[in-house]
Image (tube, grey):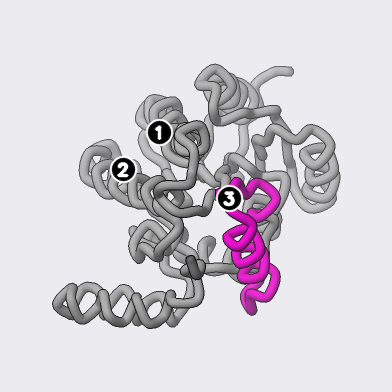
Amino acid sequence: MASMTTQAPRVFITGGASGLGRALAERYAQAGYWVCIGDIHKERGEETLQALQAVTTAQYLHCDVQREDDLQSAADWLRQHWSGVDVVINNAGVATAGAIDEQSMEDWQWVMDINVLGVVRGCKVFTPLLRQQGGGHLVNVASLAGVIHPPKMASYCATKAAVVALSETLTLELDSDNIAVSVVCPAIFRTNLAESLRASDPTSTVLTQKLVNKAKVSADEIAEKVFRGVEEKQFKILTHDDSKRLVMLKRLLPYRWFRKIMLKNTAGMMRKR
């Protein structure tokens, strides 16, 4: 296919075939963006593509964020066919839960490779393209768990905190290149993240699934807040009002006081021994 010239803004979203990724894809499509989704699930990717094509120009690319070559292929495709990309959303992620002495090192390596290095690969691959075209926007999806760290979630919290730190570094490093950076820190919302969950014990599995399934906020609502935050070029996008209050408490209170609040609020997460 020959290169296409467009005045429409373009977005690329990893993990774009389901959950928050699909909700983001649909929100950007509604806003008139050309939407390219990358995902490892072919069937879901093609299903999402059909829905997007009813609204806008769209493309599905097989993309495993554990493979730098896949992300480079996506960047090359966007350069060749859409003359570049305006917004890159590093959204693909997985979930882990369990006590520090129970979770396997294999699970630690798995979640680190996807949640941290998957985002690193996306930023590394797309930065040259954004720089060459004179700017753009990197959006890294972390979690409230990257800022507030509950018990029995050490591996997940560590990955999301790393994404926040990476994003803080890049918002300074890439400023002179006209590349904006945002990090998204949602609290729990209804999504399919529990499908990927690796937990070290049945209690953590049940609790995580319960929290996700009973969440009051939907993926579409989160996508709307992310879209608006990115349009406004916010750096840290907190999607829940109670999250904003909790983050403020952590910032202002002596840690020993905040620790007491966390111990009280997370008592139900601790398994009786």
**Is disc 1 surrounded by few (<14), some (14 to 19) or many (20+) residues within 10 Å?**
many
Q: Are marks 2 and 3 in contact (CB under 8 Å)?
A: no
Which numbered disc covers residue 120?
A: 1
The amino acid type of the residue labelled 2 equals Leu
Between disc 2 and disc 3, the foreground one is 3
Which residue shows up at 65% across the image and 46% down it? Answer: 196
Q: Is residue 250 magenta?
A: no
Which numbered disc covers residue 166?
A: 2
Which residue shows up at 37% across the image and 57% down it? Answer: 146
Of the residues under marks 1 and 3, which one precedes in the sequence?
1
Of the 4 image quadrants, the one containing the N terminus is top right
Which secondary structure dominates the residues rendered in magenta? helix
Judge whether residue 32 can be spotted in this image.
no
Q: CA distance from mark 2 to mark 3?
A: 26 Å
Question: x, y percentage for residue 226?
Answer: 51, 62
Above or below, 49 relative to 79:
below
Q: Are marks 1 and 2 in contact (CB under 8 Å)?
A: yes
Look at the numbered disc 2 and give the secondary structure of its residue: helix
Relative to the observer, which residue lies in front, 202 or 166?
202
Which numbered disc covers residue 199?
A: 3
Look at the numbered disc 1 and give the secondary structure of its residue: helix
Which of the 4 quarters of the picture holds residue 32?
bottom right
What residue span does the magenta drawing correspond to?
193-218
Which residue shows up at 72% across the image and 45% down it? Answer: 17
The amino acid type of the residue labelled 1 equals Val
Question: x, y percentage for residue 231?
Answer: 46, 60
Q: CA distance from mark 1 to mark 2?
A: 8 Å
Q: CA distance from mark 1 to mark 3?
A: 24 Å
Look at the numbered disc 3 and give the secondary structure of its residue: strand
